[in-house]
């Protein structure tokens, strides 16, 4: 008995005993698996049945000896297990019987043939599978008619040396017969051009008459099974690729690339019409047929498609959903396929092949499956985009102003993405008397429930500021509001009113983090006055309030506890870090100050609580410079003026314009006021000052400007440049010397919102 047979019979005996002890579907499944194993390992039915009946007889005898069960039950249960085992062999058995029947038919026809070779030929021809014989070098020297039907290469053209005419030049290497694999699956090219997949089984033999090594084998067409498996794998890859995408852009960025690679297309183009009369949005993966266009993709300009391509996609989107058609239509070889994408009639897909090819039924099935998956992913992303846009619109409306007064910067970062808001908030409210109200608060809890409370308190706080309430009064009235809002108890709030003209800040805190104020060039200090308990906790007879001076150029930071409270870190360390950062940011814009603070305090894993922060810069002291009327002095004057603009929170692009205008005014004074050469006592003065909204620059000299020529030629454009770079320009020649006065209004600050919607970039790499 061979080792394989012995191991199989032992496994069968164990499985049968378990089934007799406890019959179940699981034990029957073991019998079916054993039947499949018997088919693979070549176990004969005789060995299998003899072993079964021996085991069944032993079991009956054991049951009879103990008297614990009736003999018929043992026999029926054992027979049930045997039939389940033989079920896996049923197909092979039927094939064997069919082959035997055909064999008998062929043999009966071969009775009158002369010789053994004629009978062998008839036997080979009776096989349904393709049959071949190859010599030691792999040359095919004999095939049957089934082989010719499967490959297109029959007995008439033999022999077929290596490489065989049906081999694919770009396909996998043909395994060496008898050495690398006895069974393998290989793609071939049929004589009519179709690509098929064949399952090949081979055996090595030695001819007794001359000891020549030969190989015999069979081939079977498994194209349908291979295509089905390939379709499942392709659909799985595409579904996995687009599974994590949450926007149409992301879906198409990964989906088109995967689709193009799977179907072997050179390019994939999707057009989406946002509305009936709008130009379509164009998404491209791969190369398109445009002069000078590379394979790296194209922009989303509608002009990326020529008129015939646009008309083709326009026609495709009006087709019934889930329909596909080849282009050009009605010919055997297609350049690509076009299909509507989704079921809303506003999107279409165009796949262009690298070279024209015939599209088989299996190809159509694959294309339909993949485009269906892509359509579903696009629709899911659209629904997500719409829900997210609606949610973000409501959230941002609750959060606070996006347009801020000059010299402010705000930052908000929620702890629970993808939410844009949580329980923290800020508000900056310009008031009628020129002061500015600022509120920073933190509700208990996180997520949407805290955001609902936050929205109500922020609205109430803004209304109280606009009505003229001071910081202490605002918190006192918010106590009443918070007591009537579920979930608002223990909310912490810091309210402040800034007076830029007088240089004062009044503030009151309801259990909130103290603001930090930093004078120019000095570390920040905590403003710990005006402190009391959080909202709606205890009845307080009166909320306290404190007032602190805002020195010129000082920086004030208000924030929530998420910025400084971290596990395992002393909160005082957070305060110290903010104070240290503010010592070095007097010459930076408020936005840059906020970035520096966040960068310094951000934990490695990110903030685990919401963070809201407001940064304010008090206008600096006026800048006064008086320098000799010498062009060499201008570079130093520009540097000082640029630094002053940064301290005054003038945006960099606007500051560059003002520096250029002031430099031109000073150059005019040096060049034109002192035309005969400046004496050592002749000087140029420059001053710059700002209030809450305007920046004013004055340049003065003691000379007399040369009258402007009617035709200044290529030079003499300095006054025009100063007028273009500022809002107001006044040149006064009435007094001794000349005075140039330029002014500009500081723009409102467009505050960025945390986690903005991703920019729509539809350039998709190939």
Image (cartoon, rainbow, N blue to C red):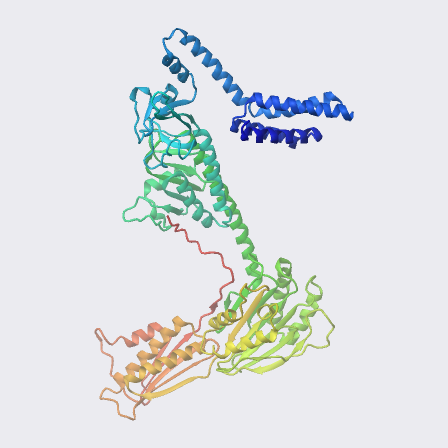
Name the quarter where the N terminus is drawn.
Answer: top right
Q: Is residue 720 above or below residue 677?
A: above
In the displayed image of the protein, which residue is found farthest to the bottom? 681
Return the residue nearer the eye: 190 or 417.
190
Pinpoint residue 707: horizontal percent, then vertical percent: 24, 82
Q: Is residue 37 above or below residue 314?
A: above
Q: Residue at x 51, y 65 (%)?
A: 402
Q: Give left or right: position of 499 versus 82.
A: left
Q: Indicate the position of residue 203 as horizontal and vertical percent values.
A: 42, 27
* Count of marks placed on residues: 0
Identify the residue at horizontal 43%, vertical 20% (top origin).
128
Above or below, 96 against 30 in this view is above
Residue at (71, 64) in percent of width and height: 484
Q: Position of residue 719 (x, y in %)?
A: 30, 76
What's the residue at 32%, 20% (across, down)? Answer: 155
Measuring from the top left, give residue 35's x and y in whole percent. 57, 27
Residue closest to the far top: 112
Q: Looking at the image, can residue 205 be seen?
A: yes
**Residue 697 falls left or right of residue 10:** left
Residue 186 in the image: above or below residue 541: above
73 vs 528, left or right, is: right
Is residue 279 in view? no
**128, 244: nearer the viewer:** 128
């Amino acid at each position: 008995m061979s080792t394989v047979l012995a191991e199989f019979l032992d496994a069968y005996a164990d499985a049968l005993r378990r089934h007799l002890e406890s019959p179940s579907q699981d034990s029957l499944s073991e019998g079916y698996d054993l039947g499949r194993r018997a088919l693979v390992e070549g176990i004969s039915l005789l060995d299998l049945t003899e072993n079964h009946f021996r085991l069944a007889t032993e079991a009956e005898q054991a049951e009879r000896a103990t008297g614990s069960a009736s003999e018929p039950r043992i026999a029926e249960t054992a027979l049930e297990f045997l039939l389940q085992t033989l079920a896996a062999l049923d197909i092979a058995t039927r094939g064997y019987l069919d082959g035997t029947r055909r064999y008998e038919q062929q043999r009966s026809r071969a009775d009158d043939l002369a010789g053994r070779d004629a009978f062998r030929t008839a036997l080979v021809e009776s096989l349904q599978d393709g049959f071949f014989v190859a010599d030691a070098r792999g040359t095919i020297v004999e095939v049957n008619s089934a082989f010719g039907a499967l490959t297109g290469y029959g007995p008439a053209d033999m022999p077929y040396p290596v490489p065989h005419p049906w081999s694919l030049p770009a396909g996998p290497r043909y395994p060496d017969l008898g050495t690398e694999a006895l069974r393998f699956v290989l793609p071939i090219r049929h004589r009519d051009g179709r690509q098929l997949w064949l399952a090949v089984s081979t055996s090595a033999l030695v001819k007794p008459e001359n000891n020549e090594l030969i190989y015999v084998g069979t081939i079977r067409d498994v194209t349908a099974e291979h295509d089905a498996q390939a379709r499942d794998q392709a659909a799985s890859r595409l579904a996995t690729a687009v599974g994590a995408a949450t926007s149409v852009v992301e879906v198409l960025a990964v989906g088109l690339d995967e689709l193009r690679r799977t179907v072997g297309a050179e390019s994939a183009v999707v057009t989406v019409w946002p509305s009936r009369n709008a130009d379509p949005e164009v998404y491209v993966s791969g190369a398109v047929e445009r002069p000078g266009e590379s394979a790296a993709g194209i922009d989303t300009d509608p002009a990326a498609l020529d008129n015939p391509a646009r008309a083709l996609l326009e026609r495709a989107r009006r087709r019934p959903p889930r329909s596909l058609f080849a282009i050009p239509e009605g010919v055997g070889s297609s350049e690509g396929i076009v299909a509507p994408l989704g079921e809303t009639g506003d999107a279409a897909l165009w796949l262009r092949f690298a070279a024209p090819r015939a599209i088989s039924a299996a190809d159509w099935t694959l294309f339909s499956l993949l485009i269906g998956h892509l359509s579903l992913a696009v629709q899911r992303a659209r629904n997500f985009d719409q829900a997210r846009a609606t949610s973000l619109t409501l959230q941002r409306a609750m959060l606070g102003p996006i347009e801020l007064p000059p010299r402010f910067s705000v930052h908000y970062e929620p702890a629970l993405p993808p939410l844009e808001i949580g329980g923290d908030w800020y508000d900056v409210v310009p008031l009628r008397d020129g002061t500015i109200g600022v509120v920073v608060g933190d509700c208990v809890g996180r997520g949407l429930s805290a955001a609902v409370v936050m929205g109500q308190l922020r609205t109430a706080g803004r209304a109280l500021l606009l009505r003229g309430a001071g910081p202490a009064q605002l918190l006192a009235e918010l106590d009443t509001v918070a007591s009537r809002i579920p979930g608002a108890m223990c909310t912490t709030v810091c309210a402040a009113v800034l007076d830029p003209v007088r240089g004062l800040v009044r503030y009151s805190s309801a259990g909130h983090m103290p603001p930090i104020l930093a004078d120019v060039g000095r570390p920040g200090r905590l403003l710990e006055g005006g402190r009391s308990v959080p909202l709606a906790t205890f009845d307080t007879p009166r909320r306290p309030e404190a007032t602190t001076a805002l020195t010129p150029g000082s920086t004030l930071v208000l924030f929530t506890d998420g910025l400084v409270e971290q596990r395992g870190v002393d909160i005082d360390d957070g305060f110290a870090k903010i104070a240290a950062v503010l010592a070095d940011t007097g010459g930076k814009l408020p936005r840059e100050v906020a970035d520096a603070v966040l960068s310094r305090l951000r934990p490695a894993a990110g903030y685990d609580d919401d963070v809201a922060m407001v940064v304010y810069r008090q206008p600096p002291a006026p800048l006064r410079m008086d320098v000799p009327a010498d062009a060499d002095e201008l570079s130093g004057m520009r540097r000082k003026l640029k630094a002053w603009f940064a301290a005054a929170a003038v945006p960099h692009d606007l500051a560059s314009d003002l520096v250029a205008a002031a430099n031109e005014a000073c150059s005019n004074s040096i060049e034109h006021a002192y035309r005969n050469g400046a004496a050592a006592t002749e000087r140029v003065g420059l001053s710059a000052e700002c209030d809450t909204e305007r920046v004013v620059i004055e340049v003065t000299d003691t000379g007399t400007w040369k009258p402007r020529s009617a035709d200044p030629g290529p030079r003499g454009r300095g006054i025009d440049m100063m007028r273009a770079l500022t809002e107001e320009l006044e040149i006064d020649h009435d007094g001794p010397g000349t005075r140039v006065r330029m002014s500009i209004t500081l723009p409102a600050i467009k505050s960025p919102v945390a986690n903005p919607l991703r920019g729509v970039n539809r350039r998709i790499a190939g």
